[in-house]
């Protein structure tokens, strides 16, 4: 689609980076959890088995102790046992206690003196120890793991102490050693069996989950791809969107190697709203897609095309680094967008206004550059050609703000003056009226042309005041002309903001009555695009105005997207052919055909035709041959002060017999 700088590409790719595969994560995490669970289970089972062995040993010790107590006399704990008592205890312990897992037992007093011990018993068996003391004091069977030497070898045993009390109140303890190896082995075998069963169940569950996780992972990745696409691209045109453009500009504004030059283009389609309102949003979308395709084909490596929203596009070029190169690229982009494009059976030729900002001259951040390009774009709309940003173009600059304040004072001081451009009846060769055009007689700058101050009127909120000012001046002058016996009319331009005001028709009537002017002598000029954009509200206001007798003229006809069929519903009496068709009709047969067609259609609809931009004798001849009613242009007369128009209007008709331009008066 378009080239991107390598560093910027890495930045943009990071925005759409995919996370690690979910299935791998699940496999790793579940394997770790299963391992932890199995280890925990093994420890638990081993403790459980050991506890169970200790409980069994304590129970056995309690039973054995009862048998020992039955065979001991109180005197047995005071001195050495008799051979008969030793024989009884040996028989008891060998019968009830000693076996392969219980190698030794002993009887001891409360102070740890061994009264009797089985052969091979460890010397510490029955000796005083913290566990023995605890058992004597608490009267509870206790046990502990200890290392015992049996037959010269050290073994791990579970030693159990079972306390007893004889009839005379003397106390002692029976100590029994059980080999711990069988206990540990039993616990380990039980743990392994249980853990193996649990692990098998978990692994089976895990294997069942893997296919589901793989499907879920693929679905999530598809969704992530979609989200990444939507996050970085416009869903209608497939171009980069505002987020991707911003990331690209950030990368260019702060590259690792330091700032370098590039250019930013802000592109706005002219009269796109007319297409939407006339043909519908679906057809408007078709036009946007076609424009996007044409822009994409026009750029090369190191250039990015983005759609900012609506009918706004942007291009960032690392190749166009100065004003000349940027203007050359702008012409290439304009040429790429040109050419007829058919929408709903209607041929449209997309046109755009292009504003240009240069980095780092006009800004060092993306916001600054986009703002400057936007300002330049609005200047391009006014001039009709691509514009590079300049400080004086900024409507919100201190200079422009100061101009807005001066304009308020100029209206209060009546420094604005109205000039009048004559309109000639092409058949009779006489001036039949004029168009009122405002100028500013600045106290220090002299006469200021409208293109130097009109752009500040609307942002300053002075549109309605200016229209009323011009109406009052023009109708006052018309009163003077009528009083002087000159049968002239006057045309005044009105804006969309004027027609949006419900009080505007009453305002027009008020000023007409104030100067005693017949409504038919006033003509209000409304551009074609205003009628298309707000046909309902504008049409309603115009109906009220026409009902009073004021005439309505459709200005700049032919350059908008409106349908010719709309003419039947517009309450107009005059059609003004745009100067672009008049300028080319002598050399371009298509322009000539358009002019003839408009004149014929207008006459069939009962409309009068005024041709703007009459610059040569040949224009006059062509227009007269086409049947055009009125001509207006520099060849016939410049915008003049009222006194010069008065002089020219008193001259005899000249155009009826031959083409003779009005002598141009100076301001």
Image (cartoon, helix red, strand yellow):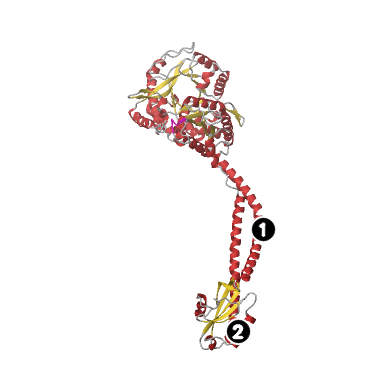
Q: Residue at x 62, y 49 (%)?
A: 217
Query: Residue 500 got which mark?
Result: none
Q: How would you rate the neighbour count of disc 1 (Cα within 10 Å): few for under 14, some for 14-19, many for 20 or more?
A: few
Q: Position of residue 180 (x, y in %)?
A: 60, 71
Query: Residue 204 got which mark?
Result: 1
Please tell me whether mark 2 sits on a helix, a strand or a loop: helix
Q: Quadrant of the C terminus?
A: top left
Q: Is residue 549 visible?
A: no
Instruction: Say whether marks 2 and 1 touch (CB < 8 Å).
Output: no
Please give the range of residues in magenta: 357-363
Does 319 appear above or below 204?
A: above
In primary-sequence order, the first of circles 2 and 1 is 2
Q: Position of residue 505 (x, y in %)?
A: 44, 32
* In front: label 2 or label 1: 2
The answer to which image quadrant residue 185 occupies is bottom right
Does 52 appear above or below 261?
A: below
Residue with the most extreme top position: 657
Of the pair 625 and 445, the residue shown nearer to us = 445
The answer to which image quadrant residue 501 occupies is top left
Q: Position of residue 331 (x, y in %)?
A: 52, 25
Query: Residue 89 got which mark?
Result: 2
Please tell me whether mark 1 sits on a helix, a strand or a loop: helix
């Amino acid at each position: 689609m378009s080239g991107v700088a390598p560093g910027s590409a890495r930045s943009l790719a990071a925005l759409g980076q995919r996370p690690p595969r979910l299935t791998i994560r699940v496999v790793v995490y579940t394997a770790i959890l299963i391992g932890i669970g199995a280890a925990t289970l093994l420890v638990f089972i081993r403790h459980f088995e050991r506890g169970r062995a200790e409980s069994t040993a304590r129970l056995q010790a309690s039973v054995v102790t009862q048998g020992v107590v039955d065979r001991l006399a109180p005197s047995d704990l005071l001195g050495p046992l008799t051979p008969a008592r030793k024989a009884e205890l040996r028989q008891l312990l060998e019968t009830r206690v000693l076996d392969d897992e219980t190698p030794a037992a002993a009887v001891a007093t409360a102070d740890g003196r061994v009264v009797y011990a089985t052969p091979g018993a460890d010397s510490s068996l029955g000796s005083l120890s913290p566990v023995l003391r605890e058992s004597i004091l608490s009267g509870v069977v206790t046990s502990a793991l200890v290392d015992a030497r049996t037959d010269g070898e050290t073994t791990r045993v579970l030693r159990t102490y079972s306390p007893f009390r004889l009839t005379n109140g003397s106390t002692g303890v029976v100590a029994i050693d059980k080999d711990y190896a069988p206990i540990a082995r039993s616990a380990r075998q039980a743990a392994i069996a249980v853990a193996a069963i649990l692990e098998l169940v978990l692994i089976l569950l895990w294997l069942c989950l893997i296919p589901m996780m793989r499907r879920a992972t693929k679905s999530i990745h598809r969704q992530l791809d979609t989200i990444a696409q939507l996050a970085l691209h416009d869903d209608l045109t497939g171009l980069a969107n505002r987020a991707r453009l911003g990331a690209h500009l950030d990368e260019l504004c702060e590259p690792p190697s330091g700032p370098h030059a590039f250019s930013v283009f802000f592109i706005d389609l002219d009269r796109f709203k007319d297409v939407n309102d006339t043909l519908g949003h679906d057809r408007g979308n078709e036009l946007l897609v076609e424009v996007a395709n044409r822009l994409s084909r026009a750029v090369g490596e190191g250039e990015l095309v983005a759609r900012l929203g609506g009918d706004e596009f942007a291009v960032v070029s690392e190749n166009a680094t100065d004003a000349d190169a940027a203007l050359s690229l702008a012409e290439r982009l304009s040429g790429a967008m040109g050419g007829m494009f058919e929408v709903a059976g209607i041929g449209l030729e997309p046109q755009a206004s292009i504003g240009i900002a240069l980095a780092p001259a006009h800004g060092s951040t993306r916001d600054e550059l986009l703002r400057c390009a936007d300002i330049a774009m609005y200047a391009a709309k006014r001039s009709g050609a691509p514009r590079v940003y300049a400080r004086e173009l900024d409507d919100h600059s201190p200079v422009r703000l100061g101009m807005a304040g001066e304009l308020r004072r100029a209206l209060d001081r009546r420094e604005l003056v109205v000039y009048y451009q004559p309109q000639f009846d092409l058949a009779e060769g006489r001036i039949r009226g004029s168009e009122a055009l405002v100028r500013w007689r600045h106290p220090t700058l002299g006469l200021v042309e409208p293109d130097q101050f009109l752009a500040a009127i609307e942002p300053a909120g002075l549109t309605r005041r200016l229209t009323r000012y011009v109406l009052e001046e023009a109708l006052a002058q018309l009163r003077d002309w009528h009083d002087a016996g000159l049968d002239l009319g006057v045309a005044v331009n009105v804006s969309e903001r004027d027609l949006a005001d419900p009080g505007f028709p009453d305002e027009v009537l008020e000023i007409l009555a104030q100067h005693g002017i017949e409504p038919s002598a006033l003509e209000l000029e409304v551009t074609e695009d205003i009628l298309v954009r707000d046909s309902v509200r504008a049409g309603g206001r115009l109906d009220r105005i026409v009902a009073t007798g004021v005439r309505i003229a459709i200005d700049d006809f032919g350059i908008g997207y409106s349908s010719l069929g709309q003419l039947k519903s517009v309450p107009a009496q005059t059609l003004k052919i745009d100067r672009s068709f008049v300028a080319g009709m002598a050399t371009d047969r298509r322009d000539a055909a358009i002019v003839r067609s408009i004149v014929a259609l207008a006459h069939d609809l009962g409309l009068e035709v005024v041709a703007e931009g009459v610059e040569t004798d040949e224009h006059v001849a062509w227009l007269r041959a086409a049947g055009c009613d009125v001509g207006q242009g520099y060849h016939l007369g410049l915008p003049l002060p009222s006194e010069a128009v008065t002089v020219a209007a008193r001259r005899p008709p000249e155009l009826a017999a031959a083409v003779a331009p009005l002598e141009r008066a100076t301001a």
